[in-house]
Image (cartoon, helix red, strand yellow):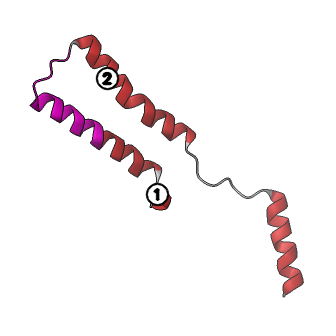
Amino acid sequence: MFSSLNRGTAVGLWFAVMVAVAACGIFFGVVVAPSTGALLLAACVVPPAIMLFMWRGAPPATVAELLHGADTADRRG
């Protein structure tokens, strides 16, 4: 299920959920003080920022892997 989930989709999903939660809070009349608003904003922005920095794709092939792949291809063909 999550194999096709990439970084952009995950971050977009995170922000969509946060907007939905904020909309529900406004709908139900929750009063947010400035200090609470700053804390909530940080809680909404920090996890996707960390995810963008830490979630990497597959590492590039090393020289040894490239040479080994060329060597085995020559032996087979």
Please give the name of the residue rendered at 37% of the width and 23% of the height, measured from the top-left corner. Answer: 42
Residue for point 56% across, 39% down:
54
As drawn, the label of residue 40 is: 2
Q: Which residues are magenta?
A: 16-32
Above-or-below relation of 26 to 13: above
Q: Give coordinates of residue 68: x percent, y percent.
A: 85, 68
Is residue 7 rendered to the left or right of residue 55? left
Q: Amino acid at mark 1?
A: Phe
Q: Which mark is residue 2?
A: 1
Q: Residues within 10 Å of mark 2 (few under 14, many from 20)?
A: some
Q: Where in the figure is residue 26, as x and y percent of width and height?
A: 13, 29
What x and y, as percent, mark residue 22?
Answer: 21, 32
Residue projecting furthest to the front: 28
| Residue toward you, 57 or 43 | 43
- Location of the N terminus by quadrant is bottom left
Give the side of residue 62 with respect to residue 13, left or right.
right
